[in-house]
Amino acid sequence: MSGTMSDSQLRGAPVGGHRRLQQVWNRMVEALSVLATALIAVLMVLICADIVVRNGFGGSLPLVSELGAMMVVLIVALQLPSAVSAGRLAQVEIIIDALEARRPRMAALLNAVFCLLGCAILGVVAWASFGILHGDWTSSDFIGIPGLGTLPTWPFRALITLGMSVAAAEFLFKGVRYLGKTLSITKEPS
């Protein structure tokens, strides 16, 4: 059994309104992941169309490089909450697995620290992203070349901020569940 537990392995059966709230939260996390997957398809079509135009007509499509750069960051931000929820982030699992077998309380505590540090780091990133979003909104910042093609940057920044915020919250929820697991383990094996 992996020391990094998925959301379904960690959570107990929620009661009452908490179950519905948890279902809504999980659907939102899944929806962000679906949106990111759709954006991957859009990016692939955009790049392929640009290749065809470059090779066939000797020109290029406007906004491809700018959109590509912005969309890669956006895709990562939107996929991150799902990766956190499913426990698909890189960790040194050989250490966690060994601790899980011998010292489950210590493993849960180490996982809680990992999650809470992840929450803090992504919280800072989300806060910084919000500042960039605010600047882009107030200055009407855009990508592209005026007269050839432009797009406002704030919708991208808003989704990046949302993805980072949801990932930070997901880390927080997991960290709290690991802390609960730490407290529920009564005795470490000798």
Image (spheres, rainbow, N blue to C red):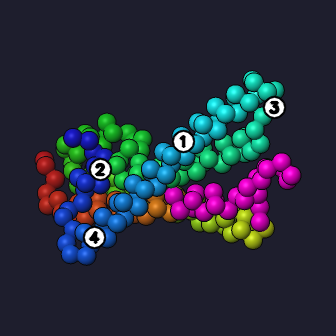
Among numbered discs 3 and 4, the one appearing first in the sequence: 4
Distance CA(mark 4)–CA(mark 1): 30 Å
- List x then y, in percent, for residue 147: 86, 52
Q: Secondary structure under badge 1?
A: helix
Q: Position of residue 33 (x, y in %)?
A: 45, 51
Give percent across and percent down for residue 182: 24, 60
Q: Inspect the image, locate mark 1, and give the three-letter code of the amino acid beneath it.
A: Ile
Single out the residue that lies furthest toward the right.
Answer: 147
Residue named by callout 3 = 59
Instruction: Pinpoint residue 2: horizontal percent, then vertical percent.
Output: 26, 41
Q: Residue at x 24, y 60 (%)?
A: 11
Say which of 187 and 148 sits in front: 148
- Label 4 sits on a secondary structure element that is helix
Identity of the amino acid at label 3? Gly
CA distance for labels 3 and 2:
48 Å
Q: Residues within 10 Å of mark 2 (few under 14, many from 20)?
A: some
Q: What stretch is highlighted in magenta?
A: 140-163
Question: If the image is split into quadrants, where does the N terminus sit?
Answer: top left
What residue does disc 2 label? 6
- What kind of element bears circle 2? loop
Please give the residue where the numbered disc 1 appears in the rendered image.
Answer: 40
**Left or right side of 189 for 127:** right
Disc 3 versus disc 2: nearer the observer: 3
Q: In percent of the image, x 53 and y 62: which residue is there?
A: 162
- Which residue is the extreme one toward the top? 55
Q: Nearer the viewer, mark 1 or mark 2?
A: 1
Q: Mark 4 points at which residue?
A: 20
Q: Quadrant of residue 117?
A: bottom left
Sequence-wise, the earlier of marks 3 and 1 is: 1
Q: Disc 4 marks which amino acid?
A: Arg
